[in-house]
Image (cartoon, rainbow, N blue to C red):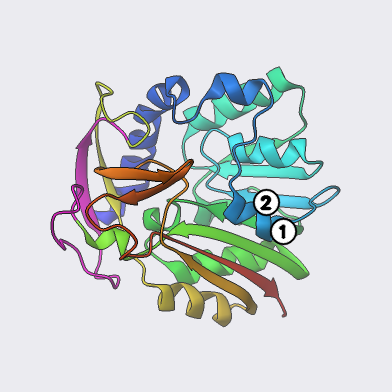
């Protein structure tokens, strides 16, 4: 397996997960249809009032966060690599009577599918690990942001990705040392799902993230780290408060999520 075909490999892996995700308690599609928002406090605190804003949502999966933003009054465009996820997003958008737009493409290829500017670019939770080149990623963000436009980013902390799945030992490097080829049974949203997929991913340290954004004229306005996750998507977790999860054996000893707000200054 090579990074030369990582796009097809990862598209297939996300297509393979979709049915399990749509049926999972993790995504709670039924509750979402009844009006629940999928957005968490980390991103809501940075997003603020989005009514009337044009928002580009990168790596949107099947569109729950995109549609949550649309419910808040934003004009939203969501993009994702998975054709089946985008189809599900479009179906959900129609069913809910919302006006979000969804585009299926590789993130790096977005300029060939879209030619406009946005007030805000948003991406969150488990996104950049699917991308080999953060310089290109930051270039895409800058390309689609209006001058003084905002970039809101929430992501799992790179320290988390250093461990094996059971959090028994450090198995991977903190810094980007090249592609990581993995296989899994089940999925983070339903660990008992009868599915199996292979995928290719990359680890990215925080310095790589920040320097990529700065290189493309996106100034850092806030940065925070958190010692818990709002998602129960890892193995061996403990819910120490409602909706707050840590690795049971580690408690508050490791960071699990970080967030940042950037502004396009040039």
Q: Nearer the viewer, residue 182 or 7?
A: 182
Say whether residue 234 is visible. no
Secondary structure beneath dot 1 equals strand
Confirm or deny contact between disc 1 and disc 2 (CB under 8 A): yes
User: What is the spatial separation of the Cα atoms under label 1 and label 2, in whole angstroms?
Assistant: 6 Å
Q: In the orientation shown, which residue stands out farthest toward the front?
A: 241
Residue 254 lies, with reference to residue 24, above or below; the image says below
Residue at image point 30% right, 44% down: 237
Disc 1 packing (10 Å; few <14; some 14–19; many ≥20)? many
Task: Locate the C terminus and report the quarter of the image it occupies.
Answer: bottom right
Task: Give percent across and percent down for residue 52.
Answer: 86, 48
Say whether residue 34 is visible. yes
Name the magenta segment's main secondary structure: loop
Instruction: Write down the residue under mark 1.
Output: 120
Q: Nearer the viewer, residue 32 or 94?
A: 32
Task: Give percent across and percent down for residue 172.
Answer: 19, 63
Asked if the magenta segment contains residue 125, the reply would be: no
Disc 2 packing (10 Å; few <14; some 14–19; many ≥20)? many
Residue at image point 69% right, 44% down: 77
Which mark is on residue 242?
A: none
Q: Residues in magenta?
A: 164-187
Q: Earlier in the sequence, mark 1 or mark 2?
A: 2
Residue at image point 76% right, 28% down: 98
Residue at image point 18% right, 47% down: 166
Instruction: Write down the residue under mark 2.
Output: 56
Task: Give percent across and percent down for residue 54.
Answer: 78, 51
Q: Nearer the viewer, residue 90 or 235?
A: 235
Secondary structure beneath dot 2 equals strand
Residue 89 lies, with reference to residue 52, above or below; the image says above
């Amino acid at each position: 397996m090579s990074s030369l075909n990582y796009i097809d490999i990862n598209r297939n892996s996300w297509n393979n997960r979709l049915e399990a995700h749509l049926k999972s308690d993790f995504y709670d599609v039924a509750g979402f249809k009844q009006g629940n928002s999928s957005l968490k406090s980390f991103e809501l605190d940075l997003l603020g009032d989005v009514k009337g804003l044009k928002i580009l949502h990168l790596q949107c999966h099947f569109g729950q966060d995109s549609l949550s933003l649309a419910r808040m009054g934003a004009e939203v465009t969501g993009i994702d690599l998975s054709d089946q996820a985008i189809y599900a997003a479009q179906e959900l958008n129609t069913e809910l009577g919302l006006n979000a737009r969804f585009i299926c493409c590789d993130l790096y290829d977005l300029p060939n599918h879209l030619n406009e500017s946005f007030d805000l670019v948003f991406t969150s939770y488990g996104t950049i690990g699917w991308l080999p080149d953060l310089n290109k990623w930051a270039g895409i963000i800058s390309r689609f942001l209006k001058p003084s436009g905002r970039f809101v980013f929430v992501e799992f902390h790179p320290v988390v990705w250093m461990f094996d799945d059971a959090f028994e030992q450090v198995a991977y490097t903190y810094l980007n040392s090249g592609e990581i080829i993995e296989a899994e049974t089940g999925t983070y949203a339903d660990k008992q799902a009868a599915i199996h997929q292979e995928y290719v991913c990359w680890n990215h340290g925080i310095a790589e993230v920040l320097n990529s954004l700065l290189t493309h004229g996106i100034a850092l306005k806030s940065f925070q780290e958190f010692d818990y996750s709002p998602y129960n998507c890892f193995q061996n977790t403990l819910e120490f408060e409602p909706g707050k999860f840590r690795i049971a054996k580690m408690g508050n000893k490791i960071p699990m999520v970080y967030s940042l707000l950037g502004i396009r200054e040039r």
